[in-house]
Image: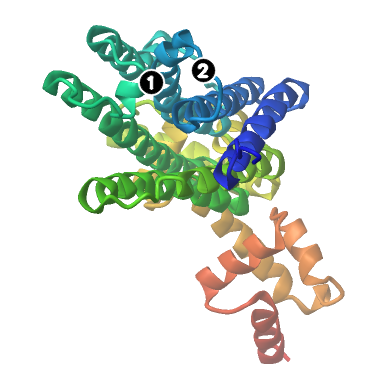
Amino acid sequence: MTTLYFNLNDVILILSIGLSIVLALSQPLLTTKLPISKYLLAAFFISIALADISILLLWNDHLPKSDLVNVLTPYLYAPVILLKGPILVLYVTSITHDDFRITAKDWLHLLPSLLVVAVIAIFGIDNQLLRLDTFGIDSAVYRAVDFIWWFVKITPFCYFIYALYIVRRYHRTVFSHNSEVNEQAIVWLYLLTIAFICSAAWSLMLSFLAVIYRLPLGITDNYINFILLIALFFYSVSHAQQLTTTKGSRKTQSQSNDNIDNLIGKIMSGITEQKLYLKPNINVEQFSEMIGLPYRDVSFAINRAFDRNFFEFINTYRVEEAKRYLGDKDHLHMSVMEILLESGFNSKSSFQRFFKRLTGESPTEYRNRVISQNQ
């Protein structure tokens, strides 16, 4: 009779291992605007491959395993699971900030893995003990193993929530500093981080169900992780390069009323005299450089004086420019697309959405109404 070495779950793990290795090796070959991000993504794929290898070694009883492998498996399994969260956080930070660098503080993310390795070493936890397969296990060892299992479930969940917080903070910042933003890329980044949170939450819930009802649903984690692996690669290729990056946030110094008035005067000079709002894709750094002010002062002054961010401030003047074209019968020969480009917009969807938000009408509705009134 033929012995079945691999079930469907094992096949998914093997596919995930192979795909992760291929994707990790392919990252250095890709051309990206932020090189560090591709190496972080490669590290994430490697962590997935190592995690899946350790899962096979841990749970597949048909694989030949030496005593050394049984001893080393826990040292592989727990740390690589714990490293997935920090690597994802660093990857999300790297693709959203153009001045991202690995700092000494970032190495503190290794502490959870080092803590688990210390627990494994102190209590001598091998493959069988990690699976709680040994009858009459010492209570202290049992608590140590229990701590490891819950720690490797809860810690990634917390990191994935932190990744979502980074996306949210980036979302607020990018609209404050830029006049044109690829919103679809941001939406996909939200969906991806939320998917990782849901996956970690599902894994955590399964652990509770396993403890309370002894339900063997843990293998579904592997199917979800395989789908997320593909989704992450798809995002890195199709959307991550289209994100508008921002600089790291720093506190803005307070300004006096006289300074604010001076800043606003120079800002309005850039609007009324230089008509900088007509430059497509202009961001707060470029705008500030053209009027000779620090960009943080410009952002602060706009928020303080106009109660809006740079994105809204610039697009307000673009809409006014578009209204001038749309309401003038001498420009009836111009299409809406031509007008939005002349007004500084470069996205039809962004133009129509912002125009309707400010006027309550679509550009076509506005044109028809104003032209008919002036006849």
Give the Cα separation between the discs numbered 2 and 1. 10 Å
Q: Residue at x 68, y 37 (%)?
A: 241
Instruction: Classify residue 218 as left or right of residue 325.
Output: left
State the residue position of label 1: 127
State the residue position of label 2: 65
Q: Quadrant of the image for the C terminus?
A: bottom right
Helix, strand or loop at mark 2: loop
Helix, strand or loop at mark 1: helix
- Which residue reaches farthest left? 139
Q: 175 or 318: which is nearer to us? A: 175
- The amino acid marked with disc number 2 is Lys
- The amino acid marked with disc number 1 is Asn
Q: 124 or 288: which is nearer to us? A: 124
- Which residue reaches farthest right? 333
Q: Position of residue 165 (x, y in %)?
A: 37, 41
Q: Looking at the image, do the residues carrying marks 2 and 1 touch, with CB atoms under 8 Å apart?
A: yes
Q: Position of residue 371 (x, y in %)?
A: 71, 85
Q: Position of residue 291 (x, y in %)?
A: 58, 32
Q: Is residue 97 visible?
A: no
Q: Quadrant of the image for the N terminus?
A: top right
Query: Label 1 neighbourhood size at 10 Å, few (<14), some (14-19), many (20+)?
Result: many
Q: Eyeballing the image, is 110 above or below 272?
A: above
Q: Position of residue 262 (x, y in %)?
A: 41, 35
Q: 95 or 73: which is nearer to us? A: 73
Q: Residue at x 41, y 50 (%)?
A: 198
State which mark lies toward you, 2 or 1. 2
Q: Is residue 328 visible?
A: yes
Image quarter of residue 253: top left
